[in-house]
């Protein structure tokens, strides 16, 4: 084993093996970034009332940050490769803080303004491609999973948005929430500058064409497709549930935010557990169970006439999707160990695209049919298609790269 500095050393405990201040800084950055990435979702009921948005416009408003984050994850991956994760993260945080401050100061007065803000918030969603390499490069192979798991738990920031944004909007107005968000973001930015440090021995920058090499293999596309279902479902629901609960059950924005937080917390909490389960029984088997449970829960949601039943089904779906996120990333390094950085960005991008599809399709379904049901039903169908595809692929995967690596997939 080698340490992050490249010198031979005996195996040590997790906390002694890396640079814990950087790990803490990466988690805080990721957590607050995810909080503002989805902040338009909890604010959507108030924004749509003020601006007179249609159901389709509401869906697009909460979906655009997800799509922008997906595209910018690849951009941030390239930036990390060339100037290092710390500086890349600092630039991204400044853009987000400046964008929110400007939106608060000037006001967001139109649907086009919400879309422009959503693009800026995409830089927050793209923090995934910065925070994970910032933390993980400090840790040796036997502790990589723990480091990435702890840094990656920053997706729990979506819970903060769901819990606090509606209440603050009720007290101060939704536009003021954009300005208030700059306060914790600025504090975390200063902590980040003081605590974060790039690991020595960073890999040399790669040519742009290197990033597209994995796309020549079908396995890369399948893993991206599976993550577009698991993470796409998770983030798409996180952004859309406040709208669903207010429109479908006529909850207040604060109560809708609380219900959303419960669902999102379930999905965030189990992501590390999903990786651990995949290590134990194999990523393919865990992912197959995930797709079965998620498809059944999503298909049943339109039939849930009462809030408790719908809430229970959303929690089950989010638990399954959260486990699925961890399961996919157990499989990715088994197949693409030499291109793990590139594949992390590509798979993450696919997840964002899936989230954009789900959030926008729910809005269009509500506007065109008067019901959210077609959006949930179609996504449940896509989940079932993913299950069939994985069933057909599993034998080939186990005979080829699974057997070659001697790992449980």
Image (cartoon, grey):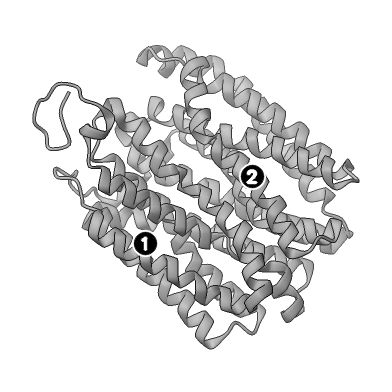
Q: Which residue is most to the left? A: 7
Q: Is residue 311 above or below residue 401?
A: below
Q: What residue is shown at x 51% (from left), y 77% (from top)?
A: 179
SS of the residue under disc 2: helix
Is residue 61 among the parts visible in the rendering? no
In the displayed structure image, the side of residue 383 where residue 157 appears, left or right? left
Q: Position of residue 86 (x, y in %)?
A: 26, 56
Viewer-side residue, 402 vs 290? 290
Specify the quadrant that holds the N terminus. top left
* In the image, residue 107 above or below residue 180: below
Per the model, the C-alpha gap separating discs 1 and 2 is 28 Å
Q: Residue furthest front?
A: 171
- Please tell me which residue lies in front, 14 or 142: 14
**Can you identify the residue that label 1 sits on?**
188
The answer to which quarter of the image holds residue 63 is: bottom right
Q: Position of residue 244 (x, y in %)?
A: 77, 56
Among numbered discs 1 and 2, the one appearing first in the sequence:
1
Report which quarter residue 301 is drawn in: top right
């Amino acid at each position: 084993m080698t340490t992050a500095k490249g010198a031979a050393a005996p195996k040590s405990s997790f906390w002694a093996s890396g640079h814990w201040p950087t790990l803490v800084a990466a988690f805080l950055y990721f957590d607050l970034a995810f909080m503002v990435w989805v902040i338009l979702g909890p604010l959507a009921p108030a924004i749509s009332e003020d601006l007179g948005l249609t159901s389709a416009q509401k869906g697009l408003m909460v979906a655009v940050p997800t799509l922008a984050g997906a595209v910018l994850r690849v951009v941030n991956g390239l930036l990390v490769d060339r100037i290092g994760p710390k500086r890349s993260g600092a630039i991204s945080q400044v853009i987000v803080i400046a964008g929110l401050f400007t939106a608060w100061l000037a006001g967001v007065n139109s649907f086009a303004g919400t879309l422009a803000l959503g693009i800026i918030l995409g830089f927050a969603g793209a923090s995934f491609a910065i925070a994970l390499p910032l933390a993980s490069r400090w840790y040796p192979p036997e502790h990589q999973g723990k480091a990435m798991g702890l840094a990656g738990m920053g997706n729990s920031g979506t819970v903060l948005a769901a819990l606090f944004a509606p209440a603050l909007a009720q007290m101060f107005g939704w536009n003021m929430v954009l300005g208030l968000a700059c306060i914790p973001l600025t504090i975390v930015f200063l902590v980040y500058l003081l605590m974060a440090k790039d690991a020595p021995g960073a890999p040399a920058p790669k040519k742009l064409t290197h990033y597209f090499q994995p796309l020549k293999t079908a396995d890369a596309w399948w893993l991206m497709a599976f993550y577009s279902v698991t993470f796409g479902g998770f983030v798409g629901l996180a952004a859309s549930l406040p709208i669903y609960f207010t429109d479908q059950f006529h909850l207040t924005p604060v109560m809708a935010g609380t219900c959303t937080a419960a669902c999102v917390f379930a999905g965030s909490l189990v992501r590390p557990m999903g990786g651990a389960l995949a290590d134990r029984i194999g990523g393919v088997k865990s992912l197959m169970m995930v797709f079965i449970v998620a498809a059944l829960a999503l298909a049943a949601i339109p039939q849930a006439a009462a809030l408790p039943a719908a809430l229970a089904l959303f929690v089950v779906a989010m638990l399954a999707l959260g486990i699925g996120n961890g399961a996919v990333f157990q499989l990715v390094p088994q197949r693409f160990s030499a291109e793990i950085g590139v594949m992390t960005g590509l798979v993450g991008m696919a997840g964002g695209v899936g989230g954009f599809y789900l959030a926008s399709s729910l809005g269009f379904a509500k506007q065109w049919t008067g019901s959210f049901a077609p959006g949930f039903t179609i996504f449940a169908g896509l989940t079932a298609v993913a299950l069939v595809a994985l069933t057909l692929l599993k034998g080939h995967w186990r005979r080829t790269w699974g057997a070659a690596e001697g790992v449980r997939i």
